[in-house]
Amino acid sequence: MFPKRRGRWLAAAPAFLLLALSCRTVPLVLEPPTGPLHYALVFVIHGDGSYLFHDAGGKPHKADQVALERARATAEANPEAEVFVFHQHDRRGLTRKNGTFELYRNGALVLLKDYRRDSGGMEAEIAIYRDLTRLGHRSDVRRFFLYFGHQIPELPQPGYHGSIPQASFGLERLADDLAGFLPPENRFDLVVLSTCNNGTPTAVAALAPRARYLAASPADLYLSHLTTETLHHLERREPMEVGLLARELALAAFRDLTEQVSTIVTVSVYDIDTLAPRVSEAAAELRARLASGDSLLEFYDCGEDPRLSWLAGLPGVTIYYRPPRFGRERSKETHSGLQCFRSR
């Protein structure tokens, strides 16, 4: 009997070893890179929910996994960057961890670890970042934050995270959390929200203290998310013009999406310093609608709002737009680049 039992233990050994590795910090290189670091990128990829989609050929994909692979490729293609990739997912394994992070420096993966999220915000990610970053207090680096997920609620709401359904998350919470990844008195050069319906005056106003430029969609965004190849080899873009970089990223994503889908494709870039003062009044009115109405919202082009149509054509908005190829809006030729909302 003993040899059989021994064989079972030997066969199970790889599984126990994998479990052990998944429960601790795993250094990926023996000698971490020590090259110059001039760029800081933070990816937060939300996969703690339903992200299944099908491509044009009918093949199923998980959108968060697609975004994760793109983030990894971007990290590896930046030899002068420190890149944190946070993947928020459902609870896994005996430890019930619901997050995994990867840390890259100089294009190499140096650390991978599971972690636990217990709140709707990014407290866990901020703590990891502050503990491990080498760029936390430097004001001479270019900073980028990219979020991939479902639409971020205008008002804090529970149910956004599948593994912690009681936790609330919303736009103001996101804006507050961004400060945790920044040195005092600093902003991100570019924030990318690869989500539906977050290209709003309220988003511009909320993120004004945290970002110089925002790339987001003022409409539905297909779950394949925005592409990030434009952010490869940032060192080759010096001297960097961030507004141009943001527009190139949005245009590349727009072209990619128009080849994949027949639904509406809308990607905007917002020059926040130019735009925020101009949309503050509209943001205040939209927040008042939130306070007085139902939490279920109807989203639509601000250019079609009787009270806020003046938002169309504002300086500081670059819009890439193609109407859907079917439905009642297929003949809609223009878009203001900003999304408004009202209670249903």
Image (spheres, grey):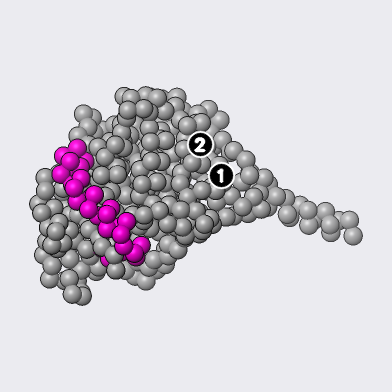
The answer to if 282 sits in the magenta stretch is yes
Q: Considering only vertical position in the picture, is 74 above or below 344? A: above
Q: Horizontally, is 134 left or right of 285 in the view?
A: right
Residue 279 placed where, x, y %?
Answer: 18, 47
Q: Predominant secondary structure in magenta?
A: helix
Q: Nearer the viewer, residue 343 or 313?
A: 343
| Magenta part of the chain | 270-299
Residue 146 falls in which quadrant of the image? top left
Quick one: SS at disc 1? strand
Q: Tag on residue 139?
A: none
Quarter occupied by the N terminus: bottom right
Q: Nearer the viewer, residue 49 or 261?
A: 49
Residue underneath mark 1? 115
Residue 261 falls in which quadrant of the image? bottom left
- Seen as rendered, the residue at the extreme right is 1
Q: What residue is shown at x 64% (from left), y 50% (from top)?
A: 95
Residue 276 falls in which quadrant of the image? top left
Cα separation, mark 2 vs mark 1, equals 9 Å
Residue 10 placed where, x, y %?
Answer: 76, 52
Label 2 vs 1, first from the N-terminus:
1
Q: Label 2 neighbourhood size at 10 Å, few (<14), some (14-19), many (20+)?
A: some
Residue 219 placed where, x, y %?
Answer: 25, 60
Q: Label 1 neighbourhood size at 10 Å, few (<14), some (14-19), many (20+)?
A: many
The answer to if 211 sits in the magenta stretch is no
Q: Are marks 2 and 1 in contact (CB under 8 Å)?
A: yes
Q: Considering only vertical position in the picture, is 158 above or below 205? A: below
Residue underneath mark 2? 128
